[in-house]
Image (tube, rainbow, N blue to C red):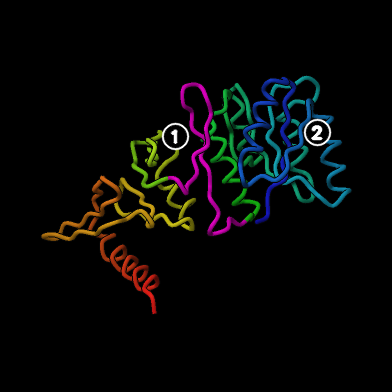
């Protein structure tokens, strides 16, 4: 799979190190360069273009010494093939500037790992970077002040909780601020199907399908999950095709 080459720019070293760490942990990113100010970022971007290995996206702080992020973002938008820009800032008041520059996203510090993951997804889609069907995607989650990465391969089902989603694994559950619709799109090639407005299920973990008096449910482990009427036929056909495919000749 093609991976993104990105540049993180921040004049505060601890913030730059935290951001670059999270970026490197994402499987969609292959290389992370860093710069401590706007001038250094421009030099690095020019060198990457000259070497034929342009940067796909710049994760950019706004309030920096010298060339600030808004000015740098405007300069980048003038490139023949501009990199995608994601602003990473502690200040909300520059959102209009980000809109005018056509930034891919606008993240507020401290950066939540799940929001960074969503920004990377937007960059990958914009840059037309494909995700292999069999590839395991990861979601960063906060647990007791520690960032951990949950693989889609370990998720049994997902439950919507407002603007959040709860990822259920064999070891427990994790609440992340990602809409269920986003995960449905992101994990559609990883074997997940929407069975209800509030549930996304990994097909490989479905053990039983029950239809009784027009009411449909599936069982995954010890959990019974409702299936809405609009998804019942599609899910049943999918499970039948899957069963026939796995049947020995």
Residue farthest toward the left in the current orientation of the protein? 213
Q: Which residues are magenta?
A: 130-154
The percent coordinates of residue 198 (x first, y second) are 31, 45
Are the residues flagged by discs 1 and 2 in contact, CB closer than 8 Å? no
Relative height, residue 62 to residue 104 (above, below): above
In the rendered image, residue 221, in percent from the top left (x then y), is placed at 29, 48
Viewer-nearest of discs 1 and 2: 1
Kindly identify the residue that appears in the image at 29 percent across and 56 percent down.
Answer: 207
Residue located at (36% from left, 46% from top):
157
Q: Quadrant of the N terminus?
A: bottom right
Question: What residue is at 58 percent from the left and 46 percent from the top?
Answer: 122
Residue 49 x, y percent position in the rendering: 84, 47
In the image, 168 versus 109, the foreground residue is 168
Label 1 element class: loop
Q: Distance between the Cα atoms at labels 1 and 2?
A: 31 Å
On-image quarter of the C terminus = bottom left
Residue at position x 49%, y 50% from top?
186
Farthest residue, direction front: 248
Secondary structure found at label 2: helix
Residue nearest the viewer, comparing 244 with 182: 244
Q: Which residue is mark 1?
A: 177
* Image-based side of 247 in relation to 94, left or right: left
Q: Nearer the viewer, residue 39 or 207?
A: 207
Q: Which residue is mark 2?
A: 41
Q: Label 2 neighbourhood size at 10 Å, few (<14), some (14-19), many (20+)?
A: many
What numbered label is drawn on residue 231?
none
Q: Would residue 132 be found to the left or right of residue 17 on screen?
A: left
Tell me the crowding category of disc 1: few under 14, some 14 to 19, or many 20 or more residues within 10 angstroms, Cα based: some
Residue 45 falls left or right of residue 155: right
Q: Is residue 6 found inside the magenta-colored segment of the image?
A: no
């Amino acid at each position: 799979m093609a991976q993104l080459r990105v540049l993180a720019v921040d004049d505060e070293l601890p913030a730059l190190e935290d951001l670059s760490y999270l970026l490197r942990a994402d499987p969609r990113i292959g290389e992370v360069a860093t710069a401590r100010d706007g001038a250094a970022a421009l030099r690095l971007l020019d060198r990457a273009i000259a070497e034929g290995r342009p940067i796909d996206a710049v994760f950019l702080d706004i309030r920096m010494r010298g060339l600030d992020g808004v000015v740098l973002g405007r300069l980048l938008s003038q490139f023949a093939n501009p990199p995608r820009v994601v602003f990473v800032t502690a200040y909300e008041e520059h959102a209009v500037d980000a809109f005018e520059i056509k930034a891919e996203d606008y993240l507020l510090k401290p950066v939540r790992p799940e929001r960074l993951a969503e920004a990377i997804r937007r960059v990958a889609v914009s840059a037309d970077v494909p995700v292999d069907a069999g590839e395991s995607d990861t979601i960063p989650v906060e647990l007791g002040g520690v960032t951990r990465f949950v693989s889609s391969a370990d998720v049994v089902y997902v439950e919507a909780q407002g603007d959040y989603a709860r990822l259920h694994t064999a070891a427990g559950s994790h609440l992340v601020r990602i809409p269920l619709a986003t995960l449905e799109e992101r994990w559609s090639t990883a074997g997940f199907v929407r069975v209800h407005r509030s549930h996304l299920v990994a097909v490989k973990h479905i053990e039983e399908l029950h239809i009784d008096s027009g009411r449909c449910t599936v069982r995954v482990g010890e959990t019974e999950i409702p299936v809405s009427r609009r998804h019942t036929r599609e899910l049943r056909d999918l499970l039948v095709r899957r069963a026939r495919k796995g049947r020995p000749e």
